Image (cartoon, grey):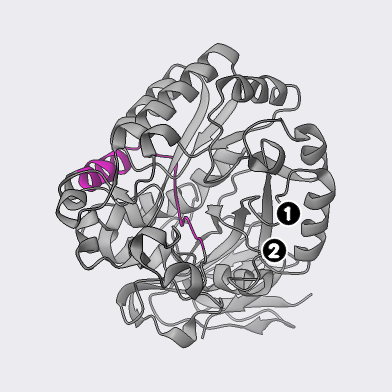
C-alpha cells in the first residue's frame, strides 16, 4: 500500500497531545507512522500530498444516519455514488439504515451488502431492522444479524410503535450487547402531517406535525428503557424537550444517547413559504424558536453527535405537489460546510465542539474505539480547511439524486480529503 507524507497541516483534536499544532504527517499502512515538525523532509518512498495553507486534520468523521438505497432504489443513489459522497463530505465512516428493498432484516442480506462495500475506502457500517420488513410487528433475527456484522438495529423512519415489541427487542439485545436506534415519532399524533405544527403550517394551510408527537414517543421509549435496561440511541431529534429527557436518563446511568441532523440546526420552517419540497423532512423543520432551543442543547453538551440525515430521493419522489412528495434531503457532502457556515462562523459552536460531534461522539454512541491523532494510532483522518469558500454545483454531486436546496449556495469551510483503509482520497 502507498505511504503518504503531508508536510504541513494543523491537528484539530481536543484529545490529542498535538491539538492545534501545525505538523507534518507520515501515513503508512493505516497508521500515523510519524508526527513531525511542519515542512519536514519527506521519508523515502512516500507520496507527498500538499493541501492549501491553513488546512486541518482531525480524527475521521462518522455519520450515524445515512439512508441506503441499494439494493432496490438504485435510481436514487447506488453504493458507488454514496461512497463518493461520503468522501466528499469528509466522512471516513457511515452508518447505513436497513430500509432497502428488500429490507435488511436477516443475516444473509447484511452479509451480502457488507461484501459489496468492502473494497471502498469508506467504512460502511450497517443497521439491521428491528422487526421483519420494518413493519413493527414481529422481531427480526437480531442476534444473527449482529453475528453477520450489524452494529445497531432500527426500523428507520417507521419507528416501532408497539410497546410490547420494543420491550422484547430491548430485552433480547441485552444478551449480546445490541443497540437500538429510534426516531421518536408518534404515528397517531403525526397523522398525515407534512410540516411543523405552528404558525407556518397555519399560514400555508398544511397539516402539521406537532412537537408533542416526538415527545410522547420518546417518553414511551425511555420508560421502556428504564424498565428493561439495554442500549438505545435516538436520532434525528428535533425537539429540545426530547433532548433534555434523554440527557436526564443518561445522567441516571442508562446507556442512551442522541444525535441531531444538521438541517434542524441551521434551518427553520420559515424556508417553506414557497412550498419547496426540498425542505420537506421527517422530523420536520421546526420554528425558529425551536431551532434556537435545539442549538442551545448542542452548545451545552446535551447531544452526543451531529449527523447528516442523508436521504436521496429521485425527481419522481420530490418534484411533486408538496403533500405527496417524499421526505428527505441530500446532506452527506454538505454537513460539515453547513455547520461551519451557520454554526462555527457565527460562534454558536466552537471548532473543537463540531469536530467532537462528528468524530469522537458518534464512535462513543456505537461503542467503537475512540482514537486520538497520535503517532502509531490506527485511525481514519478527515482533512479540511475551516475558512475556504466554495459553491455547490450540480456537477459536484455524485448521486443520481438532486434533492438538495443548497445548489448554488456558497459555504465557508471545505473538505479537502479523507484517509481511510490505507487510502488517501483527495477532493479536487
Q: CA distance from mark 2 to mark 1?
A: 7 Å
> Can you say whether 152 is above or below 411 in the image?
above
> Which residue in the protein does label 2 denote?
72
Where does the magenta region start and end?
A: 290-311
9 up-or-down from 146: above or below? below
| Residue 310 lies in the magenta stretch | yes
- Crowding at mark 2 (Cα within 10 Å: few <14, some 14-19, many 20+): some
Q: Quadrant of the N terminus?
A: bottom right
Residue 383 seen in the figure? yes
- Rendering coords of residue 350 (x, y %): 30, 53
Q: Residue at x 68, y 79 (%)?
A: 43
- Per the image, label 1 sits on a secondary structure element best described as loop
Name the residue at the right extreme.
108
Q: Is residue 365 magenta?
A: no
303 or 25: which is nearer to us? 303
The residue wearing badge 1 is 102
Residue shown at the point (68%, 36%) measured from the top left = 131
Q: Are marks 2 and 1 in contact (CB under 8 Å)?
A: yes
Q: Which element is circle 2 on?
A: loop
Q: Is residue 56 visible?
A: no
**Where's residue 236, x and y in %?**
44, 45
Amino acid at each position: 500500500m502507498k505511504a503518504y507524507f503531508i508536510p504541513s497541516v494543523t491537528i484539530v483534536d481536543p484529545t490529542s497531545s498535538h491539538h492545534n499544532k501545525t505538523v507534518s504527517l507520515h501515513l503508512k499502512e493505516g497508521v500515523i507512522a510519524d508526527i513531525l515538525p511542519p515542512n519536514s523532509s519527506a521519508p523515502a518512498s512516500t507520496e507527498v500530498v500538499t493541501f492549501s495553507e491553513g488546512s486541518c486534520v482531525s480524527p475521521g468523521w462518522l455519520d450515524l444516519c445515512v439512508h441506503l438505497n441499494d439494493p432496490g432504489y438504485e435510481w436514487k443513489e447506488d453504493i458507488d455514488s454514496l461512497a463518493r459522497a461520503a468522501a466528499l463530505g469528509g466522512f471516513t465512516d457511515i452508518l447505513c439504515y436497513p430500509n432497502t428493498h428488500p429490507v435488511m432484516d436477516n443475516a444473509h442480506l447484511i452479509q451480502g451488502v457488507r461484501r459489496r462495500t468492502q473494497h471502498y475506502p469508506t467504512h460502511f457500517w450497517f443497521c439491521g431492522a428491528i422487526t421483519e420488513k420494518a413493519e413493527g410487528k414481529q422481531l427480526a433475527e437480531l442476534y444473527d444479524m449482529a453475528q453477520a456484522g450489524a452494529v445497531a438495529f432500527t426500523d428507520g423512519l417507521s419507528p416501532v410503535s408497539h410497546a410490547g415489541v420494543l420491550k422484547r427487542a430491548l430485552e433480547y439485545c441485552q444478551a449480546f450487547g445490541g443497540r437500538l436506534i429510534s426516531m421518536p415519532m408518534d404515528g397517531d399524533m403525526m397523522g398525515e402531517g407534512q410540516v411543523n405544527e405552528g404558525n407556518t403550517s397555519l399560514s400555508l394551510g398544511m397539516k402539521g406535525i406537532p412537537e408533542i408527537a416526538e415527545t410522547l414517543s420518546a417518553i414511551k421509549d425511555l420508560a421502556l428503557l428504564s424498565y428493561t435496561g439495554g442500549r438505545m440511541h435516538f436520532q434525528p431529534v428535533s425537539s429540545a424537550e426530547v433532548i433534555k429527557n434523554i440527557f436526564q436518563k443518561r445522567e441516571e446511568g442508562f446507556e442512551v444517547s442522541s444525535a441531531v441532523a444538521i438541517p434542524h440546526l441551521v434551518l427553520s420552517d420559515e424556508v417553506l413559504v414557497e412550498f419547496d419540497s426540498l425542505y420537506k423532512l421527517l422530523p420536520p423543520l421546526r420554528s425558529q424558536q425551536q431551532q434556537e432551543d435545539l442549538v442551545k442543547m448542542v452548545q451545552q453538551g446535551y447531544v452526543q453527535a451531529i449527523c447528516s440525515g442523508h436521504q436521496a430521493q429521485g425527481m419522481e419522489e420530490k418534484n411533486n405537489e408538496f403533500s405527496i412528495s417524499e421526505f428527505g434531503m441530500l446532506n452527506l457532502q454538505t454537513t460539515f460546510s453547513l455547520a461551519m457556515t451557520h454554526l462555527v462562523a457565527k460562534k454558536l459552536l466552537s471548532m473543537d465542539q463540531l469536530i467532537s460531534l462528528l468524530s469522537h461522539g458518534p464512535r462513543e454512541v456505537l461503542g467503537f474505539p475512540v482514537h486520538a491523532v497520535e503517532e502509531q494510532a490506527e485511525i481514519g483522518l478527515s482533512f479540511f480547511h475551516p475558512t475556504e469558500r466554495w459553491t455547490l454545483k450540480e456537477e459536484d454531486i455524485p448521486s443520481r439524486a438532486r434533492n438538495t436546496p443548497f445548489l448554488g449556495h456558497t459555504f465557508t469551510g471545505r473538505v479537502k480529503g479523507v484517509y481511510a483503509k490505507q487510502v488517501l482520497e483527495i477532493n479536487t
